[in-house]
């Protein structure tokens, strides 16, 4: 889940400023439709759409280079499919394997992939985890669904999980892991398979009063041979010794980028 700031974005591909204003006026977690690259897409939450759109299509936080004309991309936490659409804009012939466990969100993901007539995209309705099982899941209604924690008391569903490890048996040009707190469990389980991954993006989530596993996560990525870059997507304190902002029971959110050499300097 992102810390949503209600600002008037100026996306490159939306129809008009008027449409952005309309989307910002829609109550949270309300279904609507909009146009993206002249295609009709379905939204489950307009505010999160605007925020993610700005991250993906304006700031292009997932942009990466590869000489492979048909890169293999694994998307853990695909949500409604904006990341898949972005990757297909970047590399039209890419092969994409995408995971999204929330049944309602998955249905919207399928509709959007179909609307764009995307090919070579395999959608799996499961959560990435360290084993094949069924777990309780908090269905947030936008981009913040997650495996259950102690503070969750409503909107609880059950989801099937899959072990990401078994899909890492070939070169992966880009691995995206944005799974709302399950990232350390998954990264720990795939540490021996990270040698197959060329570029990795992990969104790390720190929860209030929960042990912070960021050092463990960074150590695994470093030991796997990645050079690391870290940025904050919005939930960051200006004066952390004085006050730390909390959003959705998170007290920090960090974007971690890993690549195989110091090629981006």
Image (cartoon, rainbow, N blue to C red):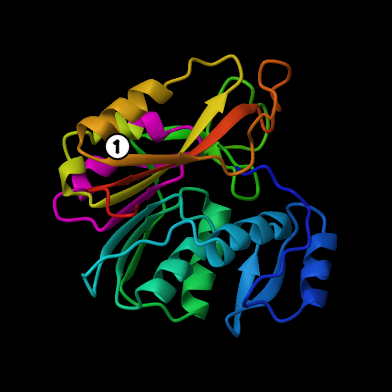
Which residue appears at 82% of the width and 55% of the height?
Answer: 27
From the top left corner, tell me how far across and down residue 234 is, in percent.
64, 42
- Image quadrant for the N terminus? top right
For mark 1, what is the residue?
132
Few, some or many C-alpha atoms within 10 Å of disc 1 (few <14, some 14-19, many ≥20)? Answer: some
Height in image: 98 above or below 42? above
The answer to whether residue 70 is above or below residue 260 is below
Residue 61 among those drawn in magenta: no
Q: Residue at x 20, y 48 (%)?
A: 168
Residue at 47% x, 62% y is 83
Report the residue that reaches farthest toward the bottom.
38
Q: Quadrant of residue 217?
A: top left
Q: Image height check: is 223 above or below 212?
A: below
Residue 170 visible: yes
Of 76 and 153, which appears nearest the observer?
76
User: Is residue 155 found left or right of 118 in the rendered image?
Assistant: right
Highlighted magenta segment, given as a residue range: 159-185
Q: Which type of secondary structure does the marked residue at label 1 adopt?
A: loop
Above or below for 54 versus 85:
above
Horizontal side of 143 relative to 162 (left or right) equals: right
Residue 7 vs residue 185, the one in the foreground: 7
Residue projecting furthest to the front: 265
- Is 171 covered by the magenta stretch? yes
Q: Position of residue 47 (x, y in %)?
A: 72, 56
Q: Quadrant of residue 144?
A: top right
């Amino acid at each position: 889940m992102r810390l949503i700031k209600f600002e008037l974005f100026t996306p490159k591909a939306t129809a008009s400023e008027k449409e952005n204003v309309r989307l910002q006026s829609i109550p949270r977690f309300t279904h609507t439709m909009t146009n993206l690259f002249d295609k009709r897409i379905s939204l489950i939450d307009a505010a999160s759409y605007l925020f993610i759109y700005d991250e993906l299509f304006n700031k292009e936080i997932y942009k990466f280079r590869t000489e492979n004309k048909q890169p293999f991309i694994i998307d853990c936490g695909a949500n409604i499919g904006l990341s898949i659409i972005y990757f297909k804009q970047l590399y039209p012939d890419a092969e994409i394997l995408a995971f999204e466990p929330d049944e309602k969100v998955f249905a919207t993901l399928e509709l959007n992939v179909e609307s764009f007539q995307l090919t070579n995209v395999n959608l799996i309705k499961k959560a990435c985890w360290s084993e094949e099982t069924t777990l309780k899941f908090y269905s947030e209604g936008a981009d913040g669904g997650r495996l259950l924690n102690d503070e969750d008391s409503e909107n609880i569903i059950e989801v099937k999980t899959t072990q990401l490890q078994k899909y890492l048996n070939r070169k992966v040009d880009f691995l995206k892991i944005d799974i709302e707190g399950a990232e350390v469990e998954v990264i720990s389980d795939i540490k021996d398979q990270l040698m197959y991954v060329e570029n990795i993006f992990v969104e790390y989530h720190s929860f209030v009063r929960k042990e912070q596993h960021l050092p463990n996560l960074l150590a695994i990525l470093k030991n796997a041979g990645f050079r690391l870059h870290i940025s904050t997507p919005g939930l960051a304190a200006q004066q952390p010794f004085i006050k730390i902002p909390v959003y959705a029971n998170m007290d920090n959110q960090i974007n971690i980028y890993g690549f195989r050499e110091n090629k981006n300097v």
